[in-house]
């Protein structure tokens, strides 16, 4: 037993450096993060209603840094105790026990409701107490047929407002619109976009149609967009330019319309009206009120006019008055039809129906016995 004690002391002390002979600092091992099987964070308001929650099937918690790395986090944001948004990502970091939450990889914020919308990005920073979610990598909004992208985005949860900043692009079926910035409201789908607005529409392999405006208003949920004055639409294929004050695009019906006066040009034909409706899929344009068509040597006034650019036919109806410079001819009818030729001029006729025409024939040279100063009256038939 006496021989065993020195051997044990030697074995214990022999493996340790002598304190008086070693200057090496003793390094404390870094604390290893705790690995939890699941993470479940929940927050309530003063009335005990849930405000937000975040769960994850796996989390690594760092006690010293007060942060948790989570995988496949899923969360819900509530409004007045009811689920309003669902959020998910590939991974994330929860800082200071939920003061800030950073999510990365396929981040999706789904607006719950009968017509769900999705806000997405590659990286977001969520501050629950301030009700703010900042998206600084590839933000995108998808709502019905509309898709908006920008450089950065900020979602103001308490206002249900998504602020898209930097050059912003809106794709809506056949339209490709570029604006300076946009605000979108998740509760209603309302959209406000600041210009200048530059839009393009491509039909088949033909030249691109363009649209310019000062700003946009609309509703992505209803699939309606309004271009604000001054608005110009250009169609190189039809050699057409239209200037208007406020123009509405309804994507569900492929209709362009304005309830305000406009002016336009198609080839050599000048067009005016109190309103306008264009049905793109059926290739017709209607001036429902105050139709005014003018071309070299002719002017036509009517209650309404219908033009089909596929057949190049024109139909004017209701109190039609056709003025021709030649012989100062005036023709009145209930209806006039015409066709636009390749040179851009329209030829009008009045097939059937009752027609009243008046023209003035220039007087011939005075003959012997004629009275001086006598003029030839207008001829009506």
Image: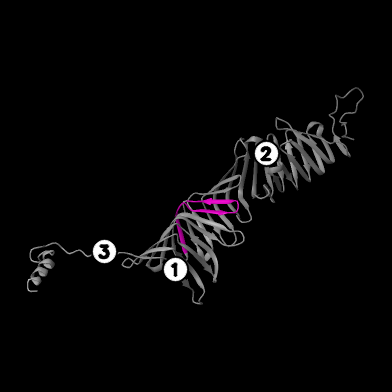
- Residue reaching furthest right? 369
Residue 347, position as x, y percentages in the image: 77, 33
**Camera-nearest residue between 302 and 31:** 31
What residue did someone put label 2 on?
265
The C terminus: image quadrant: top right
What residue did someone put label 3 on?
30
Magenta-tinted stretch: 132-150
Residue 249, position as x, y percentages in the image: 64, 49
Q: Which residue appears at 62% of the width and 52% of the height?
A: 225
User: Disc 1 or 2, which lies upstream in sequence?
Assistant: 1
At mark 1, the secondary structure is strand
Disc 1/disc 2 C-alpha distance (Å): 65 Å
Residue 63, position as x, y percentages in the image: 33, 68
What residue did someone put label 1 on?
40
| Figure quadrant of residue 271 | top right
| Figure quadrant of residue 26 | bottom left
Q: Are marks 1 and 2 in contact (CB under 8 Å)?
A: no
Disc 3/disc 2 C-alpha distance (Å): 77 Å
Q: Which residue appears at 61% of the width and 50% of the height?
A: 227
| Figure quadrant of residue 7 | bottom left
At mark 3, the secondary structure is loop
**Camera-nearest residue between 37 and 59:** 37
User: Disc 3 or 2, which lies upstream in sequence?
Assistant: 3
Q: Is residue 148 magenta?
A: yes
Q: Is residue 321 left or right of residue 26?
A: right
């Amino acid at each position: 037993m006496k021989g065993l004690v020195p051997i044990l002391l030697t074995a214990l002390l022999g493996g340790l450096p002598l304190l008086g002979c070693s200057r090496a600092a003793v390094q404390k091992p870094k604390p290893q993060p705790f690995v939890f099987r699941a993470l479940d964070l929940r927050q309530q308001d003063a009335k005990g209603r849930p405000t937000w929650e975040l769960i994850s099937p796996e989390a690594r918690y760092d006690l010293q840094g007060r942060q948790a790395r989570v995988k496949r986090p899923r969360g819900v944001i509530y409004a007045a105790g009811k689920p309003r948004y669902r959020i998910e990502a590939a991974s994330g970091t929860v800082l200071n026990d939920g003061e800030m939450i950073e999510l990365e990889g396929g981040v999706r914020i789904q607006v719950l409701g009968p017509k769900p919308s999705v806000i997405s990005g590659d990286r977001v920073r969520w501050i629950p107490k301030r009700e703010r979610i900042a998206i600084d990598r590839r933000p995108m909004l998808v709502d019905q047929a509309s898709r908006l992208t920008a450089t950065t985005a900020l979602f103001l949860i308490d206002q249900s407002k998504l602020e898209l900043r930097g050059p912003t692009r809106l794709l809506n079926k056949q339209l490709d619109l570029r604006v300076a910035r946009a605000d979108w409201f998740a509760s209603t789908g309302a959209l406000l976009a600041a210009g200048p607005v530059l839009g393009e529409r491509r039909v088949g392999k033909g030249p691109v149609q363009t649209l310019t405006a000062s700003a946009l208003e609309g509703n992505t949920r209803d699939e309606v967009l309004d271009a604000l004055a001054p608005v110009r639409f250009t169609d190189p294929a039809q050699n057409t330019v239209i200037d208007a004050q406020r123009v509405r695009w309804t994507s569900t019906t492929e209709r362009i319309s304005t309830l305000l006066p406009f002016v336009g040009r198609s080839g050599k034909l000048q067009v005016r009206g109190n309103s306008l409706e264009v049905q793109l899929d059926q290739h017709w344009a209607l001036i429902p009120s105050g139709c005014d068509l003018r071309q070299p040597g002719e002017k036509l006034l009517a209650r309404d006019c219908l033009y089909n650019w596929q057949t190049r036919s024109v139909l004017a109806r209701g109190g039609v008055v056709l003025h021709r410079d030649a012989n100062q001819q005036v023709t009145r009818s209930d209806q006039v039809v015409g066709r636009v030729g390749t040179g851009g001029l329209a030829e009008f006729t009045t097939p059937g129906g009752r027609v009243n025409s008046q023209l003035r024939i220039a007087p011939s040279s005075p003959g012997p016995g004629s009275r001086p100063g006598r003029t030839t009256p207008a001829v009506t038939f």
